[in-house]
Amino acid sequence: MDAPAVDLPAFATRHPNLASEKLGAKVVSCTDEFFAGASRMLQDSEPVFIVGKFDDHGKWMDGWETQRRRNGGNDTAIVKLGLPGTIRGLDINTSHFTGNFPPAASVQVAYCDGEPGDATEWVEIVPAKSLQGHSHHFVEIADDRVWTHLRLNIFPDGGVARLRVYGQPACDWDKKDPDTLYEVSALASGGRIVAYNDSHFGSPMPLLAPGRGVNMGDGWETRRRREPGNDWVIIELGHPVTVEKIEIDTAHFKGNYPDRVSVQGALVKESTDQSLVTQAMFWPTVLGEQKTEMDKQHFYEGAALQSAGPVSHVRVNMFPDGGISRVRIWGRLAR
């Protein structure tokens, strides 16, 4: 069975998945997972269907699947997001669930420091919504509040292959020491991919993820450039800083790493993502062109960096093309 065709909405390309297993998201509890564990919903891989694969409970399914309800009510799963944040959109994906998908689902969210309990106040952000089998269900969310947990309700039972929660991670900078060096590009710090010119072989979203890439697929890779120019990605930092250290990691990129890289930066006060694409072409240089090597962490600091004052956004350039696993920008908070 082929995966359903999908045309991603803007929120799914501009924001990370806060329910990503790689970011530490986990299922706190669920009412039932007889046929398939709820934790499978949070896997970063795309769901698959394996013909003829069965386990002790029946047909093996790549997702969360509950048993058939015979006593009324409905099933729920509570997910702790990998990072607290503002939710911009959801995808309730029923890929490969055809005769066993839930007819409807709703979503509630909460903010709590520990685990949700009886006193937790849940807020509904998606009222009961009809679902179809073997389909993506994208829902855009207009709410600026920060949440830590999500509760998926399915009516009355059935299976969900993947749950994606796209949003912007939140970081309380008012409580941070301005004299400390921070990795402001990190997702946990509120770093965000704003725009990029190409992602043929790999999305730039992993660039800001924690840890090193696990393989070549865990990074940003562009197609082979057959015309003049170079590839680039624009990153919004979690807080404006004076840049003091940069890392470009080409982990696992061996025959396809960039020949050279450079970084530009600027303090942007008012702009749209689209207008930044043009503005970034003229930003001051923070790191001049540097030769890179395969499968290596490249660190630049001190005399290698040029002063550009406080910087809120950076543009990372690859010459002419290739793949980068991680980008990290460190600095001290601009006062």
Image (cartoon, rainbow, N blue to C red):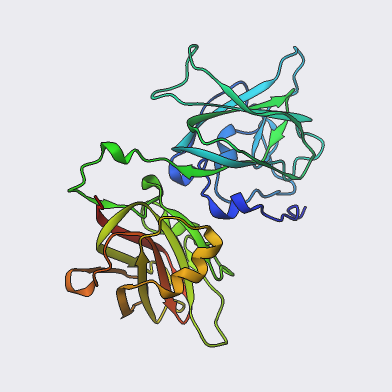
- Establish if 107 lies above or below 290: above
Residue 168 vs 304, above or below: the answer is: above
As rendered, which of 93 and 124 lies closer to the eye? 124
Q: Residue at x 79, y 30 (%)?
A: 103
Where residue 215 appears, as percent x and y from the top left, is 45, 62
Left or right for 49, reference 143? right
Describe residue 227's horizontal placement relative to residue 48 as left or right.
left
| Residue 123 rendering spot, x and y as whole percentages | 57, 23
Q: Residue 280 lies in what quarter of the image?
A: bottom left
Instruction: Examine the rendered structure and indicate whether residue 197 appears above or below residue 25.
Output: below
User: Which residue is outermost to the right?
Assistant: 99
- In this view of the protein, which residue sits in the foreground, 70 or 9? 9
Q: Is residue 140 above or below residue 288?
A: above
Quarter of the image holding residue 177? Answer: top left
- Using the rendered image of the protein, determine whether residue 126 is visible from the camera's viewpoint: yes
154 or 275, nearer to the observer: 275
